[in-house]
Image (cartoon, rainbow, N blue to C red):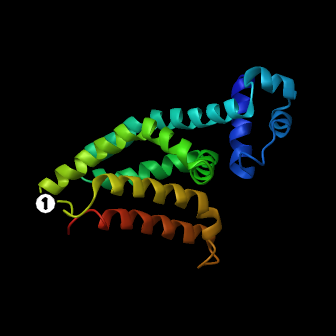
Amino acid sequence: MDSAEQIREAATHLFATRGYDGASLQAIAERVGVTKQTLLYHYPSKDVLRRAVLGGIFAHFGERLPKMLEAVTSGHGRFEALPRELFDFFSQHGDAARVLMRELLDNPEQMQRLLADHLRPWVLLVAQYIREGQRIDLIYEDVDPEAYVLNVILLVLANVVTRPLMGGVVSTDSAGAQDKQLRELFRLTRVGLFKR
């Protein structure tokens, strides 16, 4: 991994744990073990670094999109696989999930543009499959396809970000509680979509 990638990885972690405003360039440089000048050589400003972090997250997400689309467009459990694929992606990239959640709250206008650029085609495609399910009477007719897909993404994202905190709320067995929470998330996404 080259210095630029290490810097981006460290920035992702610190933006996730401290927020954009709370993560200084100096702290990011120290985490990587480079000087601030080296960091600025690769990323001339904190905003350029922030855009690189978000671009990296969307690039990783884009790499997983074909698998997610395959899950939605094939097999018996096609829509049930969507939240699982999203959960797997965000679980493997926990810092990315936290950065996205922070950015959604702190920079909604910019995130709206980024999400439109990176997610709109995919959301519209999945919505098309939902409409097909409505046409053949498999999916509730009052489901708004685009809103459903966006809500699933937000549910999964929020679940991944808060999962470590919420696991012990109703049980002392946090691992068991987290598994129950995950099963319920998948059940909710399924029963809100499919007719019996």
**Towards the viewer: 73 or 179:** 73
Where residue 84 appears, as percent x and y from the top left, is 42, 53
Element on which disc 1 rests: loop
Between 46 and 122, the one nearer to me in the picture: 46
Residue closest to the far left: 136
Q: Tell me where residue 100 appears, x and y as whole percent.
A: 58, 47
User: Badge 1, how many Cα within 10 Å: few under 14, some, many 20+?
Assistant: few
Q: Which residue is found at the position 60% from the left and 47% from the top?
A: 107
* Quadrant location, the N terminus: top right
The reply, left or right, for residue 92 in relation to residue 149 is right
Q: Residue at x 60, y 67 (%)?
A: 175
Task: Specify whether 151 is left or right of 102.
Answer: left
Amino acid type for the residue under numbered disc 1: Asp
Residue that mark 1 sits on: 137
Q: Quadrant of residue 41?
A: top right
Quadrant of the image containing the C terminus: bottom left
Residue at figure coordinates x 72%, y 51% from the top left: 17
Q: Is residue 47 left or right of residue 196?
A: right
Where is residue 88 drawn, in percent x and y?
A: 49, 49
Rendered image quadrant of residue 35: top right
Q: How far across and how far down the image is residue 105, in percent? A: 59, 54
Mark yes or no: residue 75 visible.
Answer: no
Say which of 157 and 93 sits in front: 157
The answer to whether residue 53 shows anywhere in this view is yes
